Image (spheres, rainbow, N blue to C red):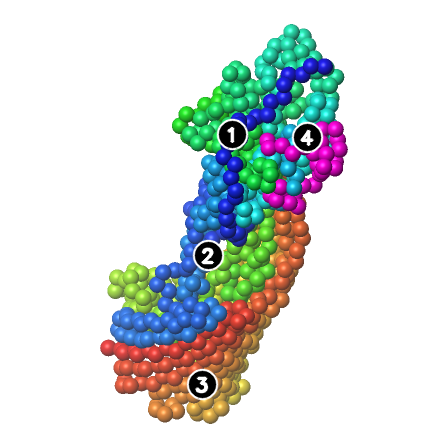
Amino acid sequence: MTVSAIALCVLPVQNLQAGGPFSETQFTPDWRIAAPFSIERDSAGEEPEDAAGQQRAEAAPSTGAAGSAGASAGGIGAGTVAAIAGGVAVVGGAVALGASGGGGGDDGGGGGSSVGSSVVTDPATPAAVNAFRTSEYLAHGGYDRVNLAHAYARGYTGAGHTIAILDDGYQLNHPEFSGKILVQFNAAGNPLPGAMPIETHGTHVTGIAAARKDNVGMHGAAFDANLALYQFGTLDQSAAQFTRAGILGATVISNSWGYNARISDVQAEIAGGKSTASALASVVGGTASDWQNFLNAMDGAQDAGSVIVFAASNNPALGGIDVSSGMPLVDNRLMGQWLAVTNVNSSDQVVSVGCGQAQAFCLAAPGTNIYSTVPTSTYGNLSGTSMATPLVSGAVVLVVEGLGLSPEEAVNRLLTTADRSFAGYSANAHGQGILDLDAATSPIGRVQVLASGNVHDGGTGPGIMQTVLSASRAFGDAFTKALDGLRIAAFDEGGAAFLYNLGDRVAVQEPVTTALDTLQSLGTRTDLTKTALPGGGGVSIAVRDADLDFRSTQLGTGVEIDAAFLDTPLWGGTLSAGFHQSSGEFLNRLAPEAAQTAFAYRPEMFSVPYAGFAEDGYSAGLEMPLGDKASIGVLSFEGEGNEDRAFDGFGALTTLSLRPTDRIAIGIDGGAMSEDGTVLGTDARGGLGLGEDSRTAFAGIRAEAGIDEHWTLLGSYHHGWTVVGGSASAIVTSVGNVKTQQMSGGLIGEHLFSKDDALGLAVSQPLRITGGQTSLNLPVWRDWNGDILTRHQDVSLRPSGQETRYEVTYGFDIDPSTRLTGLTFHRSDADHIAGRQETAAVLRLQHRF
């Protein structure tokens, strides 16, 4: 039998050198989402879709609203405010001491969840990429051209995968291969290490594929991959090696050798009526049966899941692609899991045979003057397609590992993402382009959340950038605590999987209240000041115009009304209505009059907390007396949230007010509210949608007891039950019944040291989730068939902490027009987050003129 000479695709050895130093680095493998983020709607009320390719943005996370008047963790913040509105001048100062995230700063104090846009942060930041460009990395000489460090920065190193290599021989005990070689077989099939010949070519090729990252010399393209080393031989011997590699489960079989004959000559023989095997035997040598066995062995290895990579000839004078790298052109079974590789120099010029007829499955890669391992336990520079091929083989491993792709998908990904933007690109020379690991390991087009089916079914899911949850304050850190660290897979238009930390998709509304916020609300129940209408028969109105913060006015003054409420007698009772104002403020009139000016309280402190979700809407109520000691009120509200709160719904409340004695007053409340698309003010969309609607029933009691002419005790307690209805989302399969609770107690002293002074002491817990659970169906990866793999998990909706707020307020009149009010408060487990603390002191001077 005669066979054309086997060619090793390498140029002469030169410059044998020792290795250099290396610095280990750490990296973050997840694609991250910068938080906080905004949820924005277009004119049709829907969230905007992803723009193709926008997932590759490398923006850093936002750090909160500029000018926030609070203190970051462990810091001190101060603010002043001065305003003239409605004939009132206010000057004040505030100081806040925060710990564990209290008071704004980097925690975003002073604003809501809408602080910026949602941006996917590529883990391959410039700093992360540069961290991998060590002397060991740079020693190779070609890694930067293919952006290999970008794949490393995204967490892809070849771990858990095996690169099989067919070559002339190896130094098996080279330190760079220590602990990596799973099997070795010489051409005769002997697995003993001593039977393997030691050769420079095979040792150099192996180092490029997977040499260790070990502070010495250089490292391989897939430095964490395992190795299976085989010596090529006769056609039958090489066929047996392909079969062994397939059985072992090698991800890729790298071949830096080939037969010095043109594939076009084989095609001509086939055109003349010969079989593929006979044509190969005629052109290359050997027998048709041997060639058929060889072809069948390669096909079998591909069926077992291996990608075959072959070096193109180093001889441009050959006049066309060679037999070995162009084999799929004569055996279509091999197409799809096959790559041919040409060599480019530092100027991107092909210095080997060009891709030619094989351009559809051919890549170019650096193979000139490449530094790698050689015997004995040292390093040297070689050139040729032999050096370019193991780099491409390592790239195959990285995209299969990192993106969950099948072998054929991995090949297609490398081909479609190859760089063709450089000057001098030619498909005839470079094929699909020069290998580009940055593009290959980045999302292509829209990235969507799919929690069932197959990525190739053509189904669509919510975009990862539309998968957001803006949690109301009642939930505290329940969602961030439950979801942070849960990684989900989202899939790009090529079916590739990318891991995201689900916790990055959560923002918390109403961050820590700053001292300046408290200063602005201190001593004022509302920014709408009532004025009795002249001749109005007891009718009073309050309005806020569109230009001033607050202003008392009479009708007919030409003021453009921005918000208002109206009280008017009706049937012996009082009819009230309000529009474009907080329903919580409207219903806060249920709170004791003294409490409305004694405390810098949130709307729910001594009233009904559930109405406070509607920040901008309409309210109406009718209160009717039931004799001298009781009255009944029916109140309703409808509205939306604001930039700090999410809400879209309506509700109704019935309250029974009892006054058994002159000093005791009791209010019994009951009601319900309905939300469209939110759950207790939590706005969840896309893959995290909680349901189409929610229904909440609530009940509570309020009490006021006068101890004597100076002191009054106050208290309130409310409890709610929420049911979420409608279909959930790709990730959230169900939400169990949610329970909520609010309570407060206070003591007010009046006329203690002067006739107009007031002292307030209060302890309160804002509305908090006390029970509830949601079930998640997490897409965690995909298999080689494209089927999406999921995991079920139940998470609690209870936050980690229970906020308790302690407040002391004292105010007195300096003169009939000037009042001075001071406040100090402390919040433990602020915003229902365990360990978060906030302490503040506020002083306010108010003058009327």
Q: Which residue position holds label 3?
A: 748
Front label number (2 vs 4): 4
Q: Are marks 4 and 3 in contact (CB under 8 Å)?
A: no
Q: Name the residue furthest top.
A: 272
Q: Which amino acid type is shown beneath numbered disc 1?
A: Ser
Q: Which residue position holds label 4?
A: 231
- Which one is earlier in the sequence, the residue at label 3 or at label 1? 1
- On the rendered structure, is 140 left or right of 283? left
- Which one is earlier in the sequence, the residue at label 2 or at label 4? 2
On the image, the x and y values in percent for residue 549 come to 31, 66
- Which one is earlier in the sequence, the residue at label 2 or at label 3? 2
The magenta region covers 174-201
Front label number (2 vs 3): 2
Judged from the image, the secondary structure of the residue bearing numbered disc 3 is strand
CA neighbours of label 1 inside 10 A, class few (<14), some (14 to 19), many (20+): many
Q: Are marks 3 and 1 in contact (CB under 8 Å)?
A: no
Judged from the image, the secondary structure of the residue bearing numbered disc 1 is loop
Residue 180 magenta: yes
**Image quarter hosting the N terminus:** top right
Q: Residue at x 75, y 31 (%)?
A: 189
